[in-house]
Image (cartoon, grey):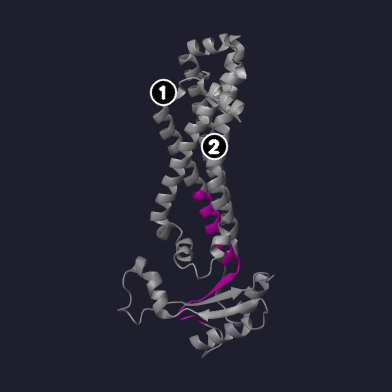
Amino acid sequence: MNWLKKRTESRAKRPTLSLPLAQAEGNVMLVVMIAVLVFLSGLVWLAGGAAQKMTGRWNHTLSNELTIEIPPNLEDSREGMTSDQRIQSVKEILAQYNAVTNVQTVEREALQKILNPWLGDISSFPDLPLPTLIEVSLHPDHGLKFDDLKEQIDRAVPGVQVIAHYAWAGEVQRLANTISVIAWGVMLFIGFVLLLVMIFAARARLAMFAPEVEVLHTLGATDGFVAGEFSSQAFRLSFWGALIGLLALLAVLGQTLSFVFPEIFSALKNMSGDLSVLQDWRMEMLGLFMLPIAIVILNTLAARMAVLSALRRLT
């Protein structure tokens, strides 16, 4: 045991080869820059995920709903057909289709609330003619032939409009795809800028500590050892910058969760409730925590490769 103690003491007294990179100027600014870019990339990642979730719900709603509009004072070829009889006739036709899961007539008060932003308060005009709206919910795998339904309703009650919402589903999906492409483009641009910043910072520090590097080479240090010094410093700076950026993003997200993602906020607030919504966001949350790790690894490798490339050119 004595020989092990003596060997340990001799190693502790032996001078170590290292570069004073921790005292280099600009370290704090580099950490702040990394934190800001991590914050922005995480924000873009969550925004892209939110857009996909939102458009997915819209697509589900648009694909599985119909709206039937019966205009007011509709003149029918069959005399004496009242508005209630028209509604009943439409409902009887809808009952023949297995794809229809729910039929609901929109109340006049609800329709007034929809029209108030455009027409003002119309509740004081009880005699104002308003169309009758019938909301129809369809089975997710309905396979309904819309043209056949429209033709059958038109024969029974001429002048009734059948509006299929699925015609908008394609537009909504294209919007979601466009948002996703923009989000990925912004994230790739942020990553590219971050790598350039780290490469230029590593090369600038190599030029700053060129005399010290020459001394290390004279003492027998290899290019790999020198590159390891710079990559270790890049790892430390990237780690703290990524951690600060992630914590800042989580803090902002926690403050705005109830407004931006109310379903997640409700699930977290009541942990005994339905947490299935959190399962829907597991990929987004996993990516949010993997993003800083990827940035730290890429920055470390970029700094090492930049220093090794510069040292090879010098030798």
- Residue range of the region highlighted in magenta in the rendering: 46-75
| Discs 1/2, front | 1
Residue 21 placed where, x, y %?
46, 22
Residue 217 vs residue 305, the one in the foreground: 217
Q: Residue at 49% of width from left, 65% of height from top?
A: 267
Name above or below for residue 288 compared with residue 203: below
Tell me the residue that label 2 is attached to.
Answer: 295
- Residue farthest bottom in this picture: 80
Residue 204 placed where, x, y %?
47, 18
Residue 17 vs residue 193, the one in the foreground: 17
Q: Main secondary structure of the magenta part?
A: helix
The quarter of the rendered structure image containing the N terminus is top right
The quarter of the rendered structure image containing the C terminus is top right
Tell me the residue that label 1 is attached to.
Answer: 23
Circles 1 and 2 in contact, beta carbons < 8 Å: no
Label 1 is placed on what type of residue?
Gln
Name above or below for residue 186 compared with residue 25: below
